[in-house]
Amino acid sequence: MRMQSILVTLLLTVSLAYYIYLPELPSAIQEPWKLMLVDAGFRTFTHLSFGLQWLGLGHHMDLLRASLEGFDSLGKLLESTWVLPSDVRVTITAFDSVPVRIYEPPVGGEDQLRRAVMFLHGGGWALGSVKVGAYDSISRLISDQLNAVVVSVDYRLYPEVQFPMQYLDCLSAAKHFLSPEVLAGYAVDPQRVAVSGDSAGGNLAAAIAQGISTDDSVSVKFSVQALIYPVLQALDFHTPSYQQNHDVPIVQRSTMVQYWLQYLGADHSLFPVLMANNHSSLQQSAITPEIRARVDWTTLLPPRLRKTYKPVTVETGHADVKEVPALLDVRAMPLLADPLILGKCPRAYILTVDDILRDDGLMYGRRLQDAGVTVTIDHYDGAFHGCFSFSFWPTRFDVGWRALMGYINWLQDNL
């Protein structure tokens, strides 16, 4: 009996280690075992959500969101009080029917105009919450450190809505906030308003910056766009960073393709098509040479990043572009915007890490610079996708905290 117990324990230990260990994790990634544990936890929540959906208890994405928010809430309760300022005032309201949370610092008022940051959270247009956990902590910290009004937009998520509703929610909230009357009500300097976001929120922030910059009906424009490991295109899932980091947590290539299919309202059967770049084959006449040039990493990336990677370009694909709604819509794909539109955008800060989306951010920075926009690229070696959200206990990573403070310091100097 004792030998059987030892064998069972050994088998369980080996199985758990196999589940957690990621052999392809780059050596440069900092605190690798902690990241492996966080990734294993996320995969476990994901598997459980699919199991609960199979039992008829709801949509797996709703269940996953609830699980992650519950974990975030627990972490928030246990967070060290010295990290998060307690005197930031939080107000829950709505901008043009879109729910928002307003974070206001104790300093400033009617006789002292303040900066403002509109923050759009990430989560693949399906996860994330402004109410609890990391995004609430990030907003409090930004407000306190910058003496700024922070508007965190609680836009609707998949599966409740699909593109373009997430974009339209953020655009409506932005137009409302940028009205001179509203800015004056919050004692905000109209020359010092930023739009910012991480991951899918970075996608929305870039798209909103473009939309506001070219909208003559909006008198006040954003002065800064601050994008944190943004996802900006879905034509090429084989850029060098996709090839190099396709299995690196927290977001792998397969996960990103799934998020895009959900966001764009495309059929899941197209998953292998997008994974192989068959959706952007050369036979797709709608994808003109001009459009392809806007995502051509062989010219937009420096040689040190191109290395020996080869473009994955398919001559004859298996899906027509029309089967993937909004594939060429710049509101979903900011990297594909016309140079004339990019030239009207505000100066940019783009934070990149060692993830699949690194090259999206770098190509966008290059295209903005070519259009005459001032761009700061801030790359963090050894950092991973989502590290901003892991700047606080119990999943705090030092590199995440450094990246977050680097972002805040840039805004301090440039907003």
Image (cartoon, rainbow, N blue to C red):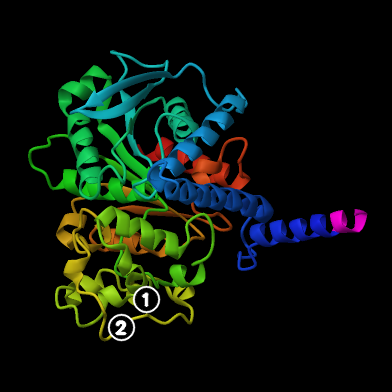
User: Residue 340 lies in what quarter of the image?
Assistant: bottom left
Q: Residue at x 37, y 59 (%)?
A: 258
Image: magenta residue range = 1-6
- Is 30 above or below relative to 165? below
* Disc 1 + disc 2, Cβ < 8 Å: yes
Give how far across and how far down residue 141 sits, in percent: 48, 30
Give how far across and how far down residue 136 sits, in percent: 45, 30
Q: Residue 276, labelled with which disc?
A: 1
Q: Give the crowd class for mark 2: few <14, some 14-19, many >=20 residues within 10 Å.
A: some
Count numbered badges in the picture. Answer: 2
- Is 222 above or below relative to 90? below
Give how far across and how far down residue 18 sits, in percent: 68, 62
Closest to the observer: 161 or 152? 161
* Identity of the residue furthest to the bottom in this view: 315
Closest to the observer: 293 or 288? 288
Q: CA distance from mark 1 to mark 2?
A: 8 Å
Task: Tell me the quadrant of the picture where the C terminus can be found.
Answer: top left
